[in-house]
Amino acid sequence: QLVLTQSPSASASLGASVKLTCTLSSGHSSYAIAWHQQQPEKGPRYLMKLHNDGSHNKGDGVPDRFSGSSSGAERYLTISSLQSDDEADYYCQTWDTGVQVFGGGTKLTVL
Amino acid sequence: EVQLVESGGGLVQPGGSLRLSCAASGFTFRSFAMNWVRQAPGKGLEWVSFLSGSGANLYYADSVKGRFTISRDNSKNTLYLQMNSLRAEDTAIYYCAKLAVVAASGPFDCWGQGTLVTVSS
């Protein structure tokens, strides 16, 4: 079964960097994922598509501070030079024929 | 600019029906598959349904299969979700989302602002 696992929460200081993790279920380590940001009281925003080789395609207007990387079944979103409005929920998404799957989301707190 | 605007949400009693709409603009609507995704209060995102650009291929989450129907009118650039036999657990913000690629599956690259559906007596 295709499942994505994310840690429920993360925190980092203003101006620092943070790396969020999304883990694909066993047997699905070759799958690409997407990262989405959801700020409080807003709809989600597409950040990037991330391939298993670490290459990624960012959405329009996504700052260079956001980058993606991969290792095995793990997919990462790194945010550098953290700003206050990076405080949000971050969701990973993957897909297969007939199904779309979301991770449970990581709530990022900027200290 | 690509834009998705949902409407049609509201308060409905358990067992009732509601039809949501999603008006699309800024892209060739008929070329892209569309999806509905929901978010219960304080919870994460849950995919609900997929419909291909032509309307030939459609899929549903098990939680809504047999109760919800996805459709589209490519002449009106509009996506719909007909929701019947509504339950309290269907209470959520419903988002429409566009597939990023002209393909059978892939990531979502544009989301609407959402419309709130509340199922309660």
Image (cartoon, coloured by chain):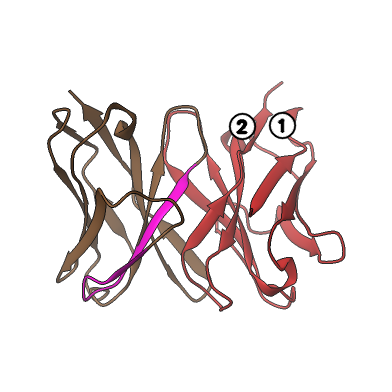
Chain colours: A brown, B red
Q: Quadrant of residue A108?
A: top left
A86 sits to left or right of B30: left
Q: Residue furthest right?
A: B75
Q: Crowding near pointer 1: few (<14 within 10 Å), some, many (20+)? A: some
Q: Are dots 2 and 1 in contact, CB under 8 Å?
A: yes
Residue B50 to residue B19: above or below:
below
The residue depicted at 74 percent of the width and 76 percent of the height is B54
Residue B100: percent from the left, percent from the top?
52, 66
Q: Quadrant of residue A88?
A: top left
User: Given the image, on which type of amino acid does mark 2 rest?
Assistant: Ala
Asked if residue A55 is among those painted magenta in the image, a careful observer would answer yes
Q: CA distance from mark 2 to mark 1?
A: 6 Å
Q: Quadrant of residue B24?
A: bottom right
Which of the labelled discs sits on residue B14, or is there none? 1
Asked if residue B63 is among those painted magenta in the image, a careful observer would answer no
Residue A45: percent from the left, percent from the top?
46, 46
- Which sits in the foreground, B26 or B33? B26
Q: Crowding near pointer 2: few (<14 within 10 Å), some, many (20+)? A: some
Name the subunit of mark 1: B
Residue B62: percent from the left, percent from the top?
55, 58
Tell me the residue that label 2 is attached to.
Answer: B88
The residue depicted at 68 percent of the width and 63 percent of the height is B27
Q: Earlier in the sequence, mark 2 or mark 1?
A: 1
Name the subunit of mark 2: B
**Where are the magenta residues, as a range?**
A44-57
Residue B13 visible somewhere in the drawing: no
- Which sits in the foreground, B113 or B90? B113
User: Given the image, on which type of amino acid does mark 1 rest?
Assistant: Pro
The residue depicted at 51 percent of the width and 73 percent of the height is B105
